[in-house]
Amino acid sequence: MNITSTCSRTWRDLAVGIEADGCRNESDSMGDIQVPADCYWGAQTQRSLAHFCIGSERMPKAVYHAMGYVKKAAVLLHKQAGRMHDDTADAIIQACDETIAGALDAHYVLYVYQTGSGTQSNMNVNEVIANRAIQLLGGTLGSKDPVHPNDHVNMGQSSNDTFVTAMHIAMVQVLEDKLFPAVDQLATTIGSKSAQWMTRPKIGRTHLQDAVPLTVGQEWSGFEAQLRDALQRLQQARDGLYPLAIGGTAVGTGMNAPAGFSRDMARTLAELTGRPFITARNKFAAQAGLDATVTVMAALRGLATVLMKIANDLRWLASGPRCGIGELRLPQNEPGSSIMPGKVNPTLCEALVMVATQVIGLDNAVAFAGSQGNFELNAMRPILINNVLRANAMLGDGCELFCRYVIEGTELADDTIDTHLQRSLMLVTALSPEIGYDKAAEIAHKASAEGSTLKAATLDLGYMDEAEFDRVADPQRMTGSGVSGA
């Protein structure tokens, strides 16, 4: 029986990067099935390829790499306790190392939309590692001898505790290896610009209307502080991923796992990954709920909202160049129009806004999926981990490119800043403590109606002389001498 006939695509379409000459026969509890001869996956993976070829999104490779750590930790403990022959264990360990390194990525082929526990991806890993170990031991692929995907690779485990454990490992790794450094670098670069421009006064804006002055550096210090706060919230959310469900097996009771397995697995995984993983205090909560993952996604959404604000502020401040605000000059990275010669657009700002918009949408899906736990299992795991890893990748790439191609090369348009500063009516705010609110308002209305400057209106009304006006309405004085965070 060719199970792939139930899907409009053949196994060659479904298997990325695999070339096979013919098929081999494999079997599982459902019966026999044909599997591409040279592939390391087995019967259950093949069935999943046929029944769940939904869309184009594959389970992220980071999940499979993390599963490699889980399987390696388990076999190390089984070998140490004498539950597995050394040669069998060593072959499995080598296959696990190849999985972790990405050398077997072409054999991890399943789609995101599958069984909600992640069982099919767990079995994909079990089958690939088992067949690779069989090959290393000189056996025949698909024979399950001398290495069995369930009896050996999955010993003491269930998909219900391994997959969510791999989710946590994968999230911690991508957060710490990619996103955290990217956000930190962006914040640091913005901070250096802030320090450079800390004493440069400009007009402030609230409600999209002119407001009292601040410095460019103060404005940018707000960008940096928002990013630092978002990073701190992400780090706090990351800490909630350290407790692991492994050892709970099917429903959290630990059935079929050796005594102390959960504690030993967490310790071994901490040693293998260099991260401070611990065993979850309550395995029922760890497997039935996905609260830590939902919290991480919410923190990613928080970062997205910060990035959207910064990107939008920069593209507004750079609008023009002659008929907009035009206070910033962003780097010109590429032509902006197919019809208007010389037009250059804030394209990376727009791209970052799109990234943020997509992440906010992914968070909605994660929040809803996280609410769908039933009894001893949340069966929405694949969509949660896929969305979190997608969001992490987009935000990490977005931060890196935004920093490199926008922030680093941004310059001030000093003439435009000065023009806006001198034309603003809101410098009148500094006059209010000297002459009272009503008289200050009268000056502002007069200047607005006549199209004159605040100084001219003040002198016409006789409320101050020129020297007194210049002293009180000094924009630099109004910014608090460039002090940020005052």
Image: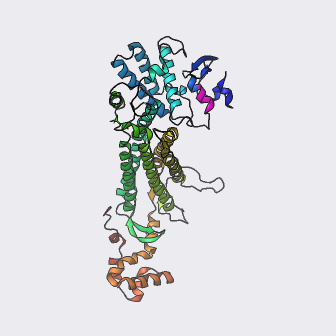
Q: Nearer the viewer, residue 433 or 52?
A: 52
The correct choice, above or below, for 120 with respect to 387 in the image is above
Magenta stretch, residue numbers: 46-55
Q: Is residue 401 left or right of residue 466?
A: right
Q: Residue at x 46, y 33 (%)?
A: 160
Q: Position of residue 185 (x, y in %)?
A: 39, 46
Q: Is residue 409 visible?
A: no
Magenta: main secondary structure equals helix
Which quadrant does the N terminus fall into? top right
Q: Is residue 416 visible?
A: yes
The correct choice, above or below, for 455 with respect to 205 in the image is below
Q: Nearer the viewer, residue 236 or 409?
A: 236
Where is residue 428, by image quadrant? bottom left
The correct choice, above or below, for 32 with respect to 178 in the image is above
Q: Residue at x 37, y 50 (%)?
A: 233
Where is residue 321, by image quadrant? bottom right
Q: Position of residue 104 (x, y in %)?
A: 50, 25
Q: Position of residue 286 (x, y in %)?
A: 40, 39
Q: Residue at x 59, y 51 (%)?
A: 335
Residue 154 is a magenta residue: no
Q: Position of residue 268 (x, y in %)?
A: 34, 28
Which quadrant does the C terminus fall into? bottom left
Q: Nearer the viewer, residue 168 or 395?
A: 168
